[in-house]
Image (spheres, rainbow, N blue to C red):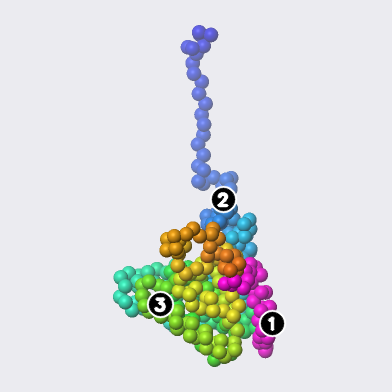
Amino acid sequence: MLKNLFRKREYITVSSRDLKNNQSFPNIPNNKWTSCEKCKNIIYKDDLEKNYNVCIKCGYHFKISAEDRINQIFDENEFTQLFTEMESKNPLDFEGYEEKLNINKKKSSLEEAVVTGIGKINDKEVATAIMDSNFMMGSMGSVVGEKITSIIEYATQKRLPLIIFTASGGARMQEGIFSLMQMAKTSAAIARHNDAGLLYITVITNPTTGGVTASFAMQGDIIVSEPNSVIGFAGRRVIQNTINENLPDDFQSAEFALEKGFIDSIVKRKDLRDYLSKILSLHEVAEYAK
């Protein structure tokens, strides 16, 4: 009615709440969740770690550190690092290289992009090199090549089987020809290990590209890969523009390499330790005498 237009307005008071300090609201810790790079599924980090850093939904294998790899593959407290004293320099006086090395050392808690040493898999002793893409994308400079060559030569001298876990963006451009020389040096050491009649297993992880693929990564007596790993030399676009042809969607994947006979098997991360142990047993690698 018309008289309602002139009625006194009624007000209510709404009390404010401090949402930041109110303990009745759930407290969700930061940095406890991550998303899968492939399927975008949101994953609780503790669940991801329990599943070998593999997506629970789609099976995507996350990149892991050399330390994680050691914990997953080798017997507990049975891994010893070797050749830790080697340190990269700047042979070409490449501007900003020392700073980049220092940044990567702090970020990855590593001195270089590869960890070398000896360990046991179900009491079977092996020599190993484990590349870590957290350090300059696992690029191969002179120290990476020297450490890998040294562990190969150690394996030859001690007559040990050798396992190399590869993960690399290729040769390190800041070291120019010094990085490219590592392809020949590591390959020659592998040849001497082979001439001694010793077993060499390559485990390819994502990504393995460039000079690493063109040398020791593809020289194993047995070459296995984690699922969906990128395996290649030149980049996809470079190849496509060079040959003027469209490439298959799965080109340079582990599955493509298996189909074409470039690798021997694809092994899921959770099965890798048992797989390697079985291969060592089949090749009569004796258990270490306790």
Residue 172 drawn at (x, y percent): 40, 72
Q: Where is residue 263, by image quadrant?
A: bottom right
Q: Residues within 10 Å of mark 1 (few under 14, many from 20)?
A: few
Q: In the rendered image, is residue 132 in sight? A: no
Q: Earlier in the sequence, mark 2 or mark 1?
A: 2
Q: Nearer the viewer, residue 77 or 134?
A: 134
Q: Which residue is mark 3?
A: 180
Q: Residue at x 50, y 23 (%)?
A: 11
**With respect to residue 246, does 18 lie above or below?**
above
**Relative to residue 33, is residue 102 drawn left or right?**
left
Instruction: Please tell me whether mark 1 sits on a helix, a strand or a loop.
Output: helix
Magenta stretch contains residue 133: no
Q: Which mark is residue 282?
A: 1
Residue 28 drawn at (x, y percent): 56, 51
Instruction: Please tell me whether mark 3 sits on a helix, a strand or a loop.
Output: helix
Looking at the rendered structure, the kind of residue marked 1 is Leu
Q: Nearer the viewer, residue 249 or 164?
A: 249
User: Of discs 3 and 2, which sits in the foreground?
Assistant: 3
Judged from this view, the residue extending furthest toward the front is 244
Residue 101 drawn at (x, y percent): 39, 72
Verify CB contact (< 8 Å) between mark 2 and mark 1.
no
Residue 111 drawn at (x, y percent): 44, 75
Q: Which residue is mark 2?
A: 27
Q: Which residues are magenta?
A: 261-290
